[in-house]
Image (cartoon, rainbow, N blue to C red):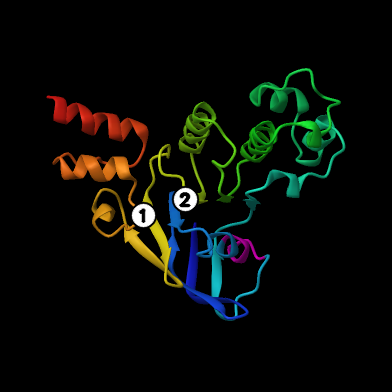
C-alpha cells in the first residue's frame, strides 16, 4: 500500500507547490507555515483539487477519507444521530466516544467548536480507511483531547495516515516527517535522523537535542524519556 506523488505540481493563481515522494503505511507528519499549502496538498491527494503537472498514484488503496480543519464543512445531518448515520456509524458508540451521550437530537451546529471537532473525529476514526488524511486535526482541541487523538491514531493497525499540521506540543509517534517550504514538499526522513533537517522541529525537542538527549520520536512519551535520560 503506497501513495506516490510523482513530480506533482499544484497551482493557484500565482502560487504553486511541487511535491514528490512516496508514503508507505504508518503515520506521516507534514508541517509548514500557515499558507504554505498543507490544506491544498491534502485536497489534491484526496482528488478534490487538480494537479497541473505530474500525477498522484494510489497503489493498493481502495478507501480513503479527508478530514477538513473546520468540521462544520462536513456536516450533513440536522442532529447528531443523523450525522452518525451519514457516516455509517452507530450513534450510541460515537456519542459515548465523544463525550456526548444522550444528545442524539442535538443539532451539530449548537455544539462548541471543540465539541464538534471531537465528535467529527470520532466519526472519522470509527472506520478503517486505507488512506486517512487529517488537515489540522488538533485545532480546537484541548490538551487532553489532543493526547486522546494521538493514542487513537497510534492504534491504527494498518493503512497510511497523513497529518497536515502546525501543532508543536502534542503529537503521535510517526514513521516519517515532511515539511513544506518555499513551494516545495521536502522529505526530512525518519525520526530521529529527520530532526537535523526539519526546520519546523518542535521547540521542546530542539531544547532536548541541545542538551545532548535526542528523542527517538516526537510523541510526549518520547520527550519524557529523553528528559529522564538527562535527569539520570
Residue 43 sits in which quadrant? bottom right
Q: Secondary structure at mark 1?
A: loop
Q: Residue at x 20, y 26 (%)?
A: 228
Answer yes or no: do the residues labelled 2 and 1 have beta carbons within 8 Å? yes
In the depicted view, which residue is nearer to us: 127 or 144? 144
Q: Is residue 193 left or right of residue 45?
A: left
Q: Position of residue 72 (x, y in %)?
A: 74, 45
In the depicted view, which residue is nearer to us: 97 or 117? 117
Q: Residue at x 78, y 17 (%)?
A: 102
Measure how far apart labels 2 and 1 are at the Cα level: 8 Å
Q: Is residue 10 magenta?
A: no
Q: Main secondary structure of the magenta part?
A: helix
Quadrant containing the C terminus in the rendered view: top left
Q: Residue 200 shows which numbered tag?
A: 1
Classed neighbour count for the residue bearing mark 2: other residues with Cα under 10 Å, few (<14), some (14–19), many (≥20): many
Residue 179 sits in which quadrant? bottom left
Region in magenta: 42-47
Q: Residue at x 60, y 41 (%)?
A: 128
Q: Residue at x 63, y 79 (%)?
A: 13
Q: Position of residue 174 (x, y in %)?
A: 39, 45
Amino acid at each position: 500500500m503506497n501513495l506516490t506523488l510523482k513530480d506533482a505540481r499544484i497551482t493557484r493563481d500565482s502560487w504553486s507547490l511541487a511535491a514528490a515522494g512516496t508514503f508507505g503505511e504508518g503515520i506521516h507528519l507534514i508541517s509548514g507555515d500557515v499558507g504554505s499549502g498543507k490544506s491544498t496538498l491534502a485536497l489534491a491527494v484526496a482528488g478534490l483539487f487538480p494537479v497541473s503537472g505530474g500525477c498522484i498514484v494510489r497503489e493498493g488503496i481502495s478507501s480513503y477519507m479527508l478530514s477538513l480543519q473546520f468540521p462544520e464543512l462536513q456536516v450533513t445531518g440536522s442532529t447528531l444521530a443523523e450525522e452518525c448515520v451519514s457516516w455509517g456509524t452507530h450513534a450510541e458508540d460515537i456519542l459515548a466516544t465523544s463525550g456526548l451521550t444522550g444528545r442524539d437530537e442535538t443539532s451539530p451546529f449548537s455544539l462548541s467548536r471543540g465539541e464538534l471537532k471531537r465528535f467529527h473525529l470520532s466519526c472519522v476514526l470509527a472506520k478503517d480507511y486505507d488512506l486517512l488524511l487529517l488537515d489540522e486535526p488538533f485545532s480546537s482541541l484541548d490538551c487532553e483531547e489532543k493526547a486522546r487523538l494521538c493514542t487513537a491514531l497510534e492504534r491504527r493497525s494498518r493503512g497510511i495516515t497523513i497529518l497536515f499540521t502546525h501543532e508543536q506540543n502534542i503529537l503521535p509517534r510517526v514513521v516519517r516527517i515532511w515539511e513544506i517550504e518555499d513551494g516545495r514538499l521536502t522529505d526530512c526522513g525518519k525520526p530521529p535522523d529527520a530532526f537535523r533537517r526539519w526546520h519546523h522541529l518542535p521547540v521542546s525537542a530542539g531544547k532536548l537535542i541541545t542538551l545532548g538527549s535526542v528523542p527517538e520520536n516526537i510523541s510526549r512519551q518520547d520527550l519524557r524519556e529523553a528528559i529522564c535520560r538527562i535527569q539520570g
